[in-house]
Amino acid sequence: MKAFFAALVAAAVTSVTAHYTLPDFIMNGAATSDWEYVRETQNYETNMPLTDATSPLIRCYENNTAASTSTATVQAGATVGFQANGDFYHPGYFSAYMSAASPEADSEEAGTSQTWFKIWQDTPTYTPGTDGQPGTLSFPLETTDQFTFRIPPSLPSGQYLIRGEQIALHVASTYGGAQFYLSCAQVNVENGGDGDPTPLVSFPGVYTGYEPGILIDIYDLPSNFTGYVAPGPAVWNE
């Protein structure tokens, strides 16, 4: 009986450590403190992912933590990012979005309409098969604990939300199987330009969960597969 309960505890620990949150904003080449500039997500204790692509939580995975989160000052064109509280154990697709924040980045109203634009993505690399064998996908950021990207240098100055996301695909062969790990940082962008970010999308709204980059069996690719199709809009980074 003791062995049985020990096995249950071990399984629970493994389940939690195989998941993660994105609590740290990366700026000036270093990670900041947990939840300093990143809105505390609902899974901050459990690490459990979101699996409903149409849930209101797909925006920032938080409720009412905007006002208690500080706003970081960053420069247009700077490299920023997110650090997880553990390695990205699961293979998946990474992206970063931004939204102009009205009235301010620390308001719950920020980012609640069609104001989001994609500024970066990291897609799995497809290698075609040979001699009749199926092709494979590889995931460069797997087993790292952070991802970084550049704020577009022509982005107008002002307050924004930055949304970092990994869509883990290890059990994405059925609807609702993809796992969303995400969080939002609050920033004030200085020394910006006169760019016009497009296209603009909303969260929820941009995903249905049926996109070929979300509903996919990465271990059994179809014979006509030619490459991973990223969900969401095209990247704007000028």
Image (cartoon, helix red, strand yellow):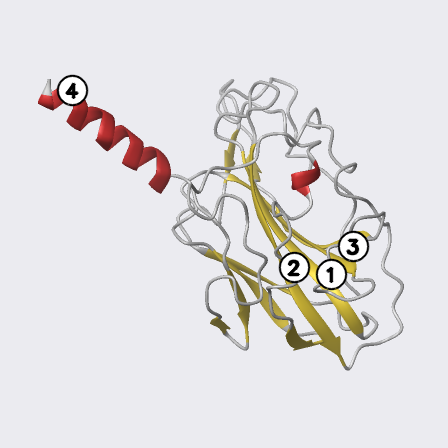
In this image, 103 relative to 33: left or right?
Answer: right
Q: Earlier in the sequence, mark 2 or mark 4?
A: 4
Q: CA distance from mark 2 to mark 3?
A: 9 Å
Q: Earlier in the sequence, mark 4 or mark 1?
A: 4
Q: Which mark is residue 66?
A: 2
Q: Position of residue 69 (x, y in %)?
A: 60, 65
Q: Which mark is residue 107?
A: 1
Choose mark 2 or mark 4, whichever is in front: 2
Query: Vertical placement of 170 versus 173: above or below?
Result: below
Q: Earlier in the sequence, mark 1 or mark 2?
A: 2
Is residue 76 in view from this perspective? Answer: no
Q: CA distance from mark 1 to mark 2?
A: 6 Å
Q: Earlier in the sequence, mark 2 or mark 3?
A: 2
Q: How many marks?
A: 4
Choose mark 3 or mark 4, whichever is in front: 3
Question: What SS does tag 1 mark?
Answer: loop
Q: Which residue is mark 4?
A: 4
Q: Which residue is mark 3?
A: 109
Q: Measuring 84% from the left and 72% from the top, which residue is drawn there?
A: 156
Q: Measuring 54% from the left and 54% from the top, which residue is drawn there?
A: 40
Question: What SS does tag 4 mark?
Answer: helix
Question: What SS does tag 3 mark?
Answer: loop
**Of 135 and 48, the residue lying toward us:** 48
Question: What's the residue type where badge 4 is placed?
Answer: Phe
